[in-house]
Image: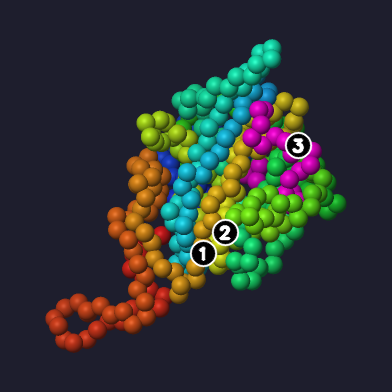
Amino acid sequence: MAYQYRLSQFSSQAYGPFGLAGPSVSSTDTSSNTNIENDTRAFTQGLGNNHGPSRSHAGLIGQPIPFVVGQFAGNTIRAELFEIQKANLGRKYARVDRRPLDPPPVVSLKLFEVTNEADSVTERELPNDEIQVLGLVCTVDLFPLPGTVPALPPTRNHSRLGPISRAEPMSPSRYVHHRRTSSGQISSSPPSPAPSRNPSQHSSTFVSTHSREPSFEEPASPSSNIVVHHVDGQPIVEGTQLTNALVGATFVQPTVVDWHGKKTLMFVFADLAVKTEGTFILRYRVFDIFSRAERHDHLVIQAECYGGPFRVYSTKEFPGLQASTELTKLISRYGVRINIRETERKRRKKGDITPDSGPATGKRKHISDDEDNDGEDG
């Protein structure tokens, strides 16, 4: 699958396995960090070929979920996901000139401990210093707005996160080696246990690239015509998903940022580009690869949200980039690899001229259609 290739490229870039930069790993950290990479690769490589929500657990997203394995074992947790910075525009991906969406999309995560006593239900927002960020992962899917994509490229009949869409079944509790037979069945070897909670571990580290895959259950195939969202009254249908048109880090770990006087869990998609022109929205989904919900032997998506629309331009139509937002500048101070611009960078049109360097000889230098003055910024 295309997403498997993208995931495999993370280790060759200046990013951790989930897309964020981090310090190099010492020899003493290799074992625990290898488990992170194994579990994440296992989760993504084990995904099946179905679009959209599974029908069996469709009510889990955004609901209180009791956990029996992982950092929340013995507690009921509800998650909320919000887009706090949307992309405004992007330039169509070109292999020789890759430009990420700008400003970088950012979502924040809130977790609530839910207590049910007698007839009263209470919620307590978990302070972020009580949350182990290691294992929390956010991923994105891409949807075009109706009528805005000139010609949809051929797509395979699968979603990169098909089996976990809305219902989200994936095995978190028992990571096992498996292989698919020609009939599509899974053969497995004995499981290995999930790691226990360890708040001292950092969220952004390089890891090695071993592979281990989970067993998983194929959900019932839902209709690709399910309406999953509306934008200005226009329905967004699961079957129109164009996630394969995304390039870059589509899985990211959170960064804890002091924002508005409060520590906030932020997922920053700083390296995300689109291969197709048009107007799009992103769907964000968050899960914990080390946790398992009660009565579910599979990973569950804890929360999702849909972002605001953004436009992807052709090279010739691209208008240029605005100065970086204050949030983008703030995030960059927390070690996230991200491009920062202090001023607006507008694209130079055909016919614009600039004086040649050196003595004034009357010669002029013309800027070609494909050139702009963004420099190395994305």
Q: Give the range drawn in magenta.
A: 40-65
Q: Distance between the residues labelled 2 and 3?
A: 27 Å
Mark 2, mark 3: which one is toward the viewer? 2
Q: Mark 2 points at which residue?
A: 280
At a point 37% along the width and 40% down the height, the residue shown is 334
Query: Which is more N-terminal, label 1 or label 2?
Result: 2
In magenta segment, residue 7: no
Query: Which is more N-terminal, label 3 or label 2?
Result: 3
Q: How crowded is mark 3: few (under 14 residues within 10 Å), some or many (20 or more)?
A: some
Q: How crowded is mark 1: few (under 14 residues within 10 Å), some or many (20 or more)?
A: many
At a point 52% along the width and 36% down the height, the residue shown is 109
Q: Distance between the residues labelled 1 and 3?
A: 34 Å
- Mark 2–mark 1 contact, CB under 8 Å? yes
At a point 49% along the width and 68% down the height, the residue shown is 313
Q: Distance between the residues labelled 2 and 1?
A: 8 Å
User: Magenta region, mostly helix, strand or loop?
Assistant: loop
Label 2: which secondary element: strand
At a point 24% along the width and 84% down the height, the residue shown is 364
Coordinates of residue 217 in the picture (x, y in percent): 78, 40
Query: Which is more N-terminal, label 3 or label 1?
Result: 3
Report the amino acid beneath label 1.
Val
Q: Where is 276 relative to 36, above or below? A: below
Q: Residue 176: tell me if it is visible.
A: no
Asked whether 11 or 70 is in front, the reply is 70
Label 3: which secondary element: loop
Q: Name the residue under label 3.
A: 57
Q: Mark 1 points at which residue?
A: 312
Coordinates of residue 119 in the picture (x, y in percent): 69, 15
Report the amino acid beneath label 2.
Phe
- Numbered tag placed on residue 113 in the rendering: none
Asked whether 318 or 129 is in front, the reply is 318
Q: Where is 314 relative to 222, above or below? A: below
